[in-house]
Image (cartoon, rainbow, N blue to C red):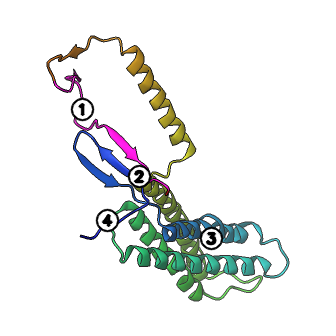
Amino acid sequence: MHSITSSRPVRVLLVSGSAEAEEDLRPVLSVHGFMMFLAWGILLPGGILSARYLKHLKGDGWFKIHVYMQYSGLAIIFLGFLFAVAELRGLYLDSIHVKFGMGAIILACVQPVNAYLRPKKSASGEIVSSNRIMWEYIHVIVGRCSIVVGMAALFSGMKHLGERYDVYLEYREKQRRRENFLARSNWVLGNGEEEDHDLLSPSGMSVDKDLHPSDRMEVQLEPLNR
């Protein structure tokens, strides 16, 4: 007989009589999240803002900042994408986070191709060609759409981690503490309504007709440090 030991906490469900081990947060996925936040939250928006507000600089300084930040963000996106695929051993489009992420990556990959095909800029005093005007509109619209979809992928990824690995934000922690406090108060003082107790029941538990099937009792067992 082979035995497997684990340092992860175990959740025991008393009502259903089952036990399940809580899944730890994978370090590679943490790196994936950090890299995507760096790309979609800092580098790519910074490149867009440089093209929008730094054109007053002498020469083409704003253009160099724009290009460097965009290509750096794109490279980090690819690395983060490869980390996630390698850790999960495949690409599965079964969650809204993955769908948003793939859409953002596709839009981001269109931008370098679009930049390579840009028409030549007209000299000072000349009329801007219609191809150049159309290209500028397409470049701006696709870039902003990629940022919007990328931010949606970021927030959906945070929500996914919160649901799967119990990584809660501060407001959710405060909400949990408040619910625990109210539950303890109701247990001690009662809810003010008449309760029916089955004294002949071996469990001695009260009979509540309004009990939802989803309600369950849980006990979490932490591993002992030896």
- Mark 4 and mark 1: span between their CA atoms? 29 Å
Regarding mark 4 in the picture, which secondary structure is present there? loop
The earlier-in-sequence mark between 3 and 4 is: 3
Regarding mark 2 in the picture, which secondary structure is present there? helix
Position of 26 relative to 203 (above/below) = below
- Secondary structure, magenta segment, majority class: loop
User: Nearer the observer, disc 4 or disc 2?
Assistant: 2
Residue type at tag 2: Glu
Q: Over which residues does the magenta segment extend?
A: 202-225
- Which label sits on residue 44? 3
Residue extending farthest to the left is: 200
Q: Position of residue 112 (x, y in %)?
A: 56, 83
Residue type at tag 3: Leu
Position of 37 relative to 67 (above/below) = above
Residue placed under numbered mark 4 in the picture: 94
In the rendered image, residue 85 lying in the magenta stretch gets the answer no
Residue under the image location 55 percent in, 40 percent down: 171
Q: Is residue 225 left or right of residue 65?
A: left
- Mark 3 and mark 4: span between their CA atoms? 26 Å
Residue placed under numbered mark 2 in the picture: 163
Residue type at tag 4: Asp
How crowded pointer 2 is (Cα within 10 Å; few <14, some 14-19, many 20+) is rated as: few
